[in-house]
Amino acid sequence: MIILSLETSCDETGAAVVEKKDNEQFVRVLSNVTATSSSLHAKTGGIIPEFAAREQIKAIIPVIVRALLNSEGINNEAIKQLNNSKQFERANEILKKSIDAIAVTSGPGLIGSLLVGVETAKTLSFAFDKPIIPVHHLLAHLFANFILNTEYSILNTGKMFPFIGLIVSGGHTDLLLFESASKFKWLGGTRDDAAGEALDKVGRILGLSYPAGPEIERRANNQQPTAKFHSPLINTEDFDFSFSGLKTEISRFIVKKHLTERLINEVCHALQEAIFAVLIKKTIRAAKLYKINNILLGGGVSANQTLRQQFELTAKSQLPTAKISAPAKTYATDNAAMIGAYALLNYKPVDWHKITALPDLYFD
């Protein structure tokens, strides 16, 4: 089966063509195209929802066309040689003949952004008479691990379950237990700021560019800290998180201090340590409690190499049988390939007119 998938939950505009053959266990990515408006949001230090949706309206059709053409081996240079009419004609042929279904992020996310993807997908579903699958954006982050060329690519999907999944992104931090692609239990999540949100907010205090995560990671690697910040809720028996207090703690730490490069790097290192310590401790504890050896990471923060390494080291000493999996970095941040991957592994099409944007979609 081949699926065209769309992702517009926040500020990215993504389209991908993904495939899963009957005799294969993993999802193959035939194309994955993402248009970003991050440079626009960097000027304001964060995402302005209306600006994001406007940029997505401009980008969605060109991104879909490019994803369809790329899926047939037509590279970007070759696409540039075709006029708009030829591009649309070829994309139309591919959609008709090669695409079996359409998947789209239905939530959670920004309502204006979600509507761009949902209404586009519904239109394509109706016009081309293709089944349509609504996809939970957060769950899809974990299923990016099922894309071929991850560490698990030599195994079959059956061996992935059950697993503990940690979603750690700019807007969410959640811990779940999966028994199958469609059967899961929410164990806990953030009570306030998400981990990625805390990174961005502290980044703003330090005068770093938006999004701050990649720069914080780079700076953290350049400095051993003398400072140490607390890891909120690290010793509680639940699986909840809380990161809003870190912003206040760091604000107080740097007040009246001159923000030298050394101090900024030191704060970045200590901030990562504080956040990662509680993420790792609670995830490993959940795996021990439920006697589960597979731990899957997902979300933009999971692209952080230090987080991945610390997970591996901690698991090796505290849960030697554990297998830690994280997506290729391309698929850790928001992208359409993960939406298609989850749709293929949890194929549940619905009538196109029943799909709606669900900005507050939670874990049912």
Image: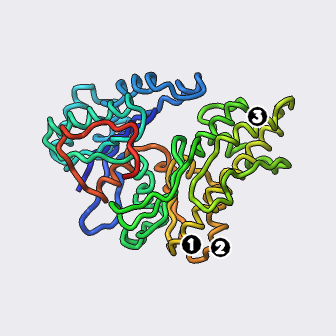
**Is 248 left, or right, of 323 in this rendering?**
right
Rendered image quadrant of residue 204 = top right
Q: Earlier in the sequence, mark 3 or mark 2?
A: 3
- Pointer 1 and pointer 2: residues touching (CB < 8 Å)? yes
Rendered image quadrant of residue 85 = top left
Q: Which mark is residue 318?
A: 2
Q: Bin the neighbour count of mark 1 within 10 Å (Cα to Cα): few under 14, some 14-19, many 20 and up.
A: some
Q: Residue at x 86, y 31 (%)?
A: 257
Residue 117, visible in the rendered structure: yes
In the image, residue 174 lies at what x, y percent?
A: 51, 52
In the image, residue 70 lies at what x, y percent?
A: 33, 43
Q: Residue at x 53, y 46 (%)?
A: 169
Residue underneath mark 3: 251
Q: Residue at x 52, y 24 (%)?
A: 40
Of the two numbered discs 1 and 2 in the rendering, the one whose residue sits closer to the viewer: 1
Q: Amino acid at mark 3?
A: Ser
**Is 258 left, or right, of 146 in this rendering?**
right
**Is 82 left, or right, of 220 in this rendering?**
left
Residue underneath mark 1: 288
Q: Bin the neighbour count of mark 2 within 10 Å (Cα to Cα): few under 14, some 14-19, many 20 and up.
A: few
